[in-house]
Amino acid sequence: MKQSKDGLLFLGICLALGILAEISFFHGAIGIAYPVFIAVFYTVVFYRIGLSFTHRRIGILLMVVIWILSASYLFFDNIFFYLLNSLMIPVLVFAHIVLITAPNHMKWSSIQFLNLFIQKIARAFSYSTRLVKVLFRRLFKQMKDETALLVKRIIIGLLIGLPLLLFITVLLMSADAVFGDMMMEVPEFILDLNFLEGFFRSLVALFLMLVFFGVFQVLHKRYIPPVVHSFKEKKKAVRWDHVIAATILILLNSIYLLFVVIQFKYFFGDALQGDYTYAEHARRGFFELVFVTMMNWSLLIICLKFVKATKRSADYFMKVMYSLLIMASGVMLISAYQRLSMYEAAYGFTMDRILAHTFMLFLIVIFAYTFIRVWLEGISLLHFYVIAGLLFYTALNAINLEKMIVDNNLERFEESNKIDIYYLNSLSYSGIEGLITLYEKDPNYPDLRMILQDRKQMIENINLDTWQSFNFKKHKVVKRLQELEL
């Protein structure tokens, strides 16, 4: 009886969490609502599982990462990360709560943990599905057999008929323009019916309640890993011949050495080959160098994993080959970095180019650690890659890349009087802030006044009073734009 009451109480808590999620994420742009929801969600997590969780160090790191990513919705307004984090944060949250409820002896960087992660997702979905079936059974028990059978048939008919109706309607709209125009007015009519909107929002909240309840019920049960002996004992380790690997590495290192020696004069100098401009030269070589570097890194990881030399001299020789490959890759990364800098000097700064710059810096860190791993075999690569990747992604969210792009483009404008105002306009509120700053410096810049007038009119038509969408950057830029004399 007590367990039943506890279950109903927690179901009510999950319903409240589902309502909060619907209010936070389905009422316009997301702002302060994300960190608020994360705070409430983790309150429920620790209420359910307690404070005696496992994997504390990596768990705390993941917690900090999740909080920083959710806080980015409050402090910044980067469209790219706004969309990417809508997928990244839920995955990290689920991985985190799976991790802190897993046995302490289970390695978080193992295949076993990945299997556990997938199993928990499947079990949570299965639990929620079973819960719906139980609720329907109890509902139908109060009905007569004929009525229950009729309701079941109607539901099955709706599940089959609605997708078919949608498909046929789209075909008919394509076949007849008048019918298509009439049907396009239907969504507006439905949106005007507030009770229908409330009904659909209630369905979303109930669905989220079932998801949360299924997840918490599954995670509440501590996982005991199955004991498997025979498979591991019979499984043979995969090994590659070190002579074949050494031959491949000698060939690659030879061509890389020749490549660097021949082209060193314009890798790091001012000389250019042929009739290429700096921008053409930069664009011509950047992608090829990054691609070759990624190939080198993949080959290096495979060799470190599967190639084991039988003699000490052979092992030392392989380490030298690995080191040469890493150094050659480092030279190519530096060259690619400089080529991209030249291209930015010619055409300006964009999100793609800044991300490419930061990714190359990340690769340099990865290669540096891999170089250490070549000579110190006891350290783990996967641990470092995962942690470095999390920190790198979190740092990208924390440093406001769009502001960096705007500041660099404004600095370039001071030097060359060139700036792409249409690209700045395509950014979020950081781009608008940059346009305002540019207008204050040069109000007669072509088309700038017109763009700012359009932005000002657009902001006047947006509802900025919803608490869920509050964002410091947005608040600052909107106030500045409203005060701007155009």
Image (cartoon, rainbow, N blue to C red):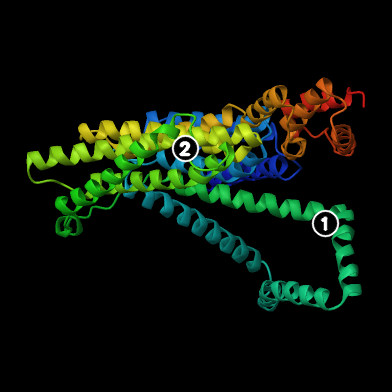
Residue 240 image-quadrant placement: bottom left
Q: Is residue 42 above or below residue 219?
A: above
Residue type (three-letter) at the residue carrying disc 1: Leu
Residue drawn at the location 14% of the way across and 51% of the way down:
243
* In-front residue for pair 399/156: 399
| Callout 2: SS | helix
Residue type (three-letter) at the residue carrying disc 2: Ala
| Callout 1: SS | helix
The label shown at residue 18 is none
Instruction: Give the residue at mark 2.
Output: 336
Label 2: few (<14), some or many (≥20) within 10 Å?
many
Residue 216 rendering spot, x and y as whole percentages = 50, 45
Q: Is residue 101 above or below residue 233?
A: above
Q: Quadrant of the C terminus?
A: top right
Looking at the rendered image, the disc whose residue lies closer to the viewer, 1 or 2, is 2
Instruction: Give the residue at mark 1.
Output: 196
Residue drawn at the location 27% of the way across and 43% of the way down:
253
